Amino acid sequence: MSDAHQTLLDLLRVEALEVDLFRGAGQGGETPTRIFGGQVIGQALAAAYQTVEDRLCHSLHAYFIRPGDPSIPVIYQVDRARDGGSFTTRRVVAIQHGRQILNMAASFHATEDGWSHQHPMPKVEDPGGLADRETLRASVVDQIPEKHHAEFLRPRPIDIREVAPRDFFAPKPADDVNHLWFRMAAARGISPALQHCLLAYASDMNLLGSSLRPHGQTWFTGKVMTASLDHAMWFHGPANFSDWHLYTMDSPWSGGARGFNRGTIYNRDGTLIASVAQEGLIRPMKPKE
């Protein structure tokens, strides 16, 4: 297991401080200047899971309130809103510097039988023939200042293979529908609850970029300010994130400096295991004079 893999798994194992009070590390994940949104969602879900027995999360709804500071830990306060016969509800508040940075509601469901259907998984290229993100970044690293090379090329825990990757720095307008394969091989054998936390972490990757695609923008163009505003996720079945999962995303609307994005996550055999929705800030930046 690589250092990056171990770091992520450690991030998602939050520490119990008191009854319903937990602490998660701030530094880690994807970005150096603020805490990656998926990290806060994953840790909040991990804190909620520590207060629930014998039930798996079926949905969560979160609001990002302030940027997270990676230099200090995050405190998670769990409210045991309801313990019912079939459903358990938790509310989680993430706190730094005495202020909320995220609040989340999560619901957990006892296993039941019922009718079943799903939309089929899209037919896309297999991940084995696609370039990983380390290879794609290495091919363009000379286009950024040398002082940023180490961070740009730093090993990251999630293996991502985009089906149709775009130019980082000079993207052309593209269809909002996009697909990627992702996994973390080191996730083999971890608990079902931690699998969900890991999938929640990964679900925030590339999703907001869907609403930038029709406008010929990426995070690297320097022409847009982005931030996740909220995040909702529904778990339809168990995950095994050590194997490839297809993340199919689209953005049916953008306007008013916001973009709405949706995602569906399938396992390798085509089973739909999660659905995601997110609205994010996509504010055009004024050119520097």
Image (cartoon, rainbow, N blue to C red):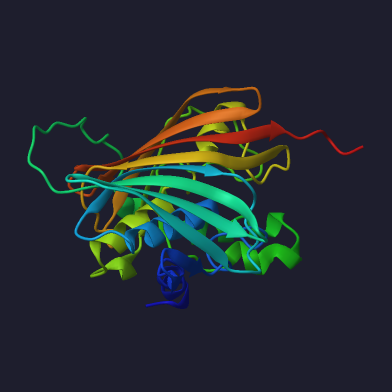
Q: Give 255 or 185, whichever is nearer the viewer.
A: 255
Q: Give 212 or 79, whichever is nearer the viewer.
A: 79
Q: Is residue 148 left or right of residue 88?
A: right
The percent position of residue 13, horizontal first and vertical second, equals 40, 70
Q: Is residue 177 left or right of residue 53?
A: right
Q: Is residue 76 left or right of residue 58?
A: right
Residue at x 87%, y 39% (from the top left corner): 288
Q: Give 199 or 174, whichever is nearer the viewer.
A: 199
Q: Give 260 or 223, whichever is nearer the viewer.
A: 260
Residue at x 49%, y 60% (from the top left corner): 76
Above or below — where is 111 with respect to 118? below
Residue at x 62%, y 42% (from the top left corner): 227
Q: Is residue 275 left or right of residue 21?
A: left
The percent position of residue 56, horizontal first and vertical second, equals 24, 53
Q: Please tell me how many numbered marks the rendered image carries.
A: 0
Residue at x 8%, y 32% (from the top left corner): 115
